[in-house]
Image: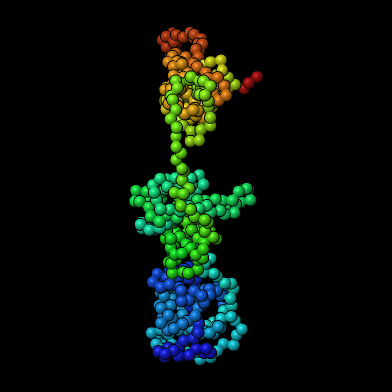
Amino acid sequence: MPGVGLDVRGVALGSRGLVLLPSLDRLVAFFAVYTAEQALDGIAGSLAIDVVRSKLGAREIALSFDAGSSDRMDRVAEVARLTGGFTFTGTSRHYVQYRDAGAPFGYDASEIIPTDAAIALYHNTFSQAYAVERKLELGSLLRRLAPHPDPGAGIEDRPFWLLSEPGLGASLLGYLARSRVDARVGIVEWPPETSFDDAPLRRFLFSVQELPARMRGPLVSTPGISAFLPASPGVAVECGYGHPITLRSCPVFDERGLVLFRGRGEPPLEVDKLPVLADVRSLGRTEQPFEELAVLSHGVGGSCAPELLLRPKLVPALGPPGRVQATLVGNDELPLLRKLVYALGADAIRSIRIAVTELGAFLLREQGLELLPLGTFFRREHPSIFVPSGYEVAPRVRPDMLFAALGAPADRIVFLRPGQAPLAVLRDGFSPLESALLEAERWAPLSSASFESQLSAEIPTVWLDPLGFRPLGKAEPAP
């Protein structure tokens, strides 16, 4: 075998080593086992991963590297046997099987295959030539692997990264500054995800040195905030997950940037260059000195203090809509209401109250009116005040204060409307729906007939005489 000689221990060894693996998942298993106890520093610079194809069209993975010494090759051969691979040694093209228990000093080839293939392998059970189909980069391979759940990977007394959505970044910054947490913050940007986005994707990136135990749980469980544990310089894995390969043993990440591996099957986020990181305490809000002022009576204005009286307004609600407990069915929708009532259950009909006005029918139900998708929906803000669904009252005062501002009409139910005057309906005007549904039906009397005379009549008896041997003997022909 050209290029193969004996090392100081008498083992047949070439300048390069090669591991032949049957599939990509076996390659991942090889790296996972090898990096668990040993770093790739010695072979990372000369490592080459090729997808090779034999003459029969079978695709396999060829992992080649500088052999270095027989000690390194022994370690590689053990891992290869465990993960289903074959180990070879040689030069740039021809490789012979590396030593095992059957040949403690190694193997040699009886003859060289005359081939122009990129790789020729000689094993004691086969000899095969392979063509290189494409190359794989170790860094891109690591980025394609999805982290698996690891409950033991939690925030401890060590540095970690926090990635926050833009809407939570300012609040989280102030929270860390008030809690006197040793942390720095910067803003990272990525290009728009789609062509429909007109702005880059921005996130707040926090570098936290140490976090009190009372703050760890809420930060990890808050939606929009993700914690990442550093695996090595330039790479971190989301809290609660672990990468299949020990990343601290793979020196393929740039320390000037940051790769964030996310769980739940999401692709990793890459920061080519770390942004400027500033102390959170230097970006916190500065407390301004205040000046004492005299307190004026409510609603009293003057040359220096204007009145603060406001009219309640309805504004779109930012939170989820509440339960629909009332609806206003307009006059044009009353025919449809009559048809929908036939589909309501007995419990709904008995619990709904209705008041018919000149604007339409108001329907109330404490358990909710979602079963009646008709009209304008209202939710209860106060026992006597209803607000349209999807709106809230501004300014956000207590419901009893709003009730007092409306004059505290205890005998009426008030319905607020956006941009219009409120409506008030008398409480006594509401009645159960079942009492307002059925209209009076007309009926016509019918007379009954007596059957006594027919039942008392005698039933006649019918019998037949014997016909005889010639029943038609005396019959006369018809004229």
Tell me if residue 419 comes above or below residue 273 in the rendering: above
Could you say where residue 198 lies in the image, as x and y percent from the top left?
62, 48
Could you say where residue 417 lies in the image, as x and y percent from the top left?
54, 23
Q: Give whichever of 38, 188 is nearer the camera.
A: 188
Tell me if residue 139 comes above or below residue 386 in the rendering: below
Q: Give whichever of 119, 176 is nearer the camera.
A: 176
Q: Can residue 90 be seen in the rendering of this structure?
A: yes
Could you say where residue 120 lies in the image, as x and y percent from the top left?
55, 83
Q: Residue furthest right?
A: 479
Tell me the residue at 65%/19% (across/down): 479
Tell me the residue at 37%/48% (across/down): 215
Q: Can residue 468 be seen in the rendering of this structure?
A: no
Q: Give whichever of 49, 173 is nearer the camera.
A: 173
Q: Give whichever of 119, 210 is nearer the camera.
A: 210
Tell me the residue at 44%/34% (across/down): 290
Tell me the residue at 43%/30% (across/down): 292
Tell me if residue 61 comes above or below residue 270 in the rendering: below
Q: Residue furthest left?
A: 213
